[in-house]
Image: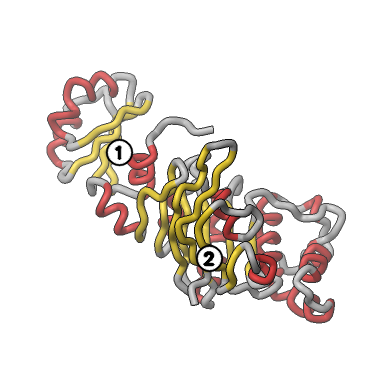
Amino acid sequence: MAPLTVSELRKSYGGREVVAGVSFALAPGECFGLLGPNGAGKTTTLRCCLGLTAPDAGRLALVGEPVPARAREARMRVGVVPQFDNLDPDFNCAENLLVYGRYFGLGDAAIRARIPPLLEFAGLAGKADTSIRVLSGGMKRRLTLARALINDPDLLILDEPTMGLDPQARHLIWERLKRLLASGKTILLTTHFMDEAERLCHRLAIMDEGRIIAQGSPQQLIAGQIEPQVVEVYGEDAPGWAQAAAGRYAKRHEVSGETVFCYVEDAAPLLAHLAQQPQLRTLHRPANLEDVFLKLTGRELRD
C-alpha cells in the first residue's frame, strides 16, 4: 500500500488555479521531497492531502484511505510537523505530548510510557518538566518532531522542519530523520534548503505555478537537467567579463548581481582563462540540486 497517492489534483482560489493537475505517489519507507518557490502550490497540496482543504478535482489516498471522505480516519495514522511551531506555552514538554496524544484516542498510561523514549529521541532527555517558554528554537523544533511521533504514525509530513535553525540543530534533526527512515517510516518533506533535500530525499518533485515540472531522485535531476561542473565568478567586473568572454568558455551562464554562474562540461579551459583575470574571484564545484532548482524556477524573488 502506498502511504500517499495523489492523482490529477486541482484546486483554485478566486479563479486562479493554484494546484493544476499534480500527481505523485510515495513508496513505503522513502523520503519524498516536494520542492518549489513561494506560491508554487506546495502548502495547498499538503492541505488537500490531509483533508484540511477540499480539492476541486483529482483523487487522493492517504495511508490507504480516500481523502477527503475518510480524512479524519487517515490522519490518525499520520504525524505532522507544521511550518511554524504551535506548542502550547502554558504546558511543559511532557504535558504537550500528553495532551496531543489524547487527540488520537490514546490512554494516558500509554502516552506516558511513550514520552521518555520520544524525549530521548529528540535530544530532550531530562526536559520533561521544562516549560516551553524557556526552550531554544532548536529544542522547540525537536519537541514538535517528537509530538508528531506520539501516535507511532505510518507517514510523517514535515513542512520545512529545519526553518530558522542553526547548523548544529539542522544536523541533529537530519540525523533523527535518517533514523526514522531506517526504522521504516515514510516521510513527505517540504523544504527550501536544497542541501537538505539532497541529503534526505530518495525522490522529489519540483513544483512551480501549481504544476510539477520535474520529478526523480536528486542524482537523476542533477544529471539530467544541468551541466556537471559549475564555476562561480565574483567581483565588480564579473558582469562585464561575462558579457565579453563567458560565452566562449561556458555552455550556459547566468548573471546574478556581481556573480556569474558558468555551467560547463569541462572546467579546465575556463579556469585557465580566469587565472589570467586577477580582478575576479572564482569557485569551482560540482553541480547540485540548487542549480537545478534555479534553472527550472528562475532566480527572481518570489513573495
| Residue for badge 1 | 283
- The answer to which of 240 and 272 lies nearer the viewer is 240
Instruction: Check the image and tell me how it is coloured.
Output: secondary structure
x, y percent for residue 236 = 33, 20
Three-letter residue code for mark 1: Leu
Q: How many marks?
A: 2
Look at 64% across and 61% down and name the residue there. 80
In the image, is 160 to the left or to the right of 249?
right
SS state under label 1: strand
Three-letter residue code for mark 2: Ile
Are the residues tagged 1 and 2 within 8 Å (C-beta)?
no
x, y percent for residue 54 = 62, 54
Outermost residue on the right side: it is: 90
Compared to residue 247, the image places residue 137 above or below, namely below
Look at 53% across and 57% down and name the residue there. 171
Compared to residue 177, the image places residue 238 above or below, namely above
Mark 2 surroundings within 10 Å by alpha-carbon count, few (fewer than 14), some (14 through 19), many (20 or more): many
- The answer to which of 91 and 275 lies nearer the viewer is 91
| Residue for badge 2 | 187
- As drawn, the label of residue 275 is none
Mark 1 surroundings within 10 Å by alpha-carbon count, few (fewer than 14), some (14 through 19), many (20 or more): few
Compared to residue 151, the image places residue 276 above or below, namely above
Give residue 148's quadrant in the image: bottom right
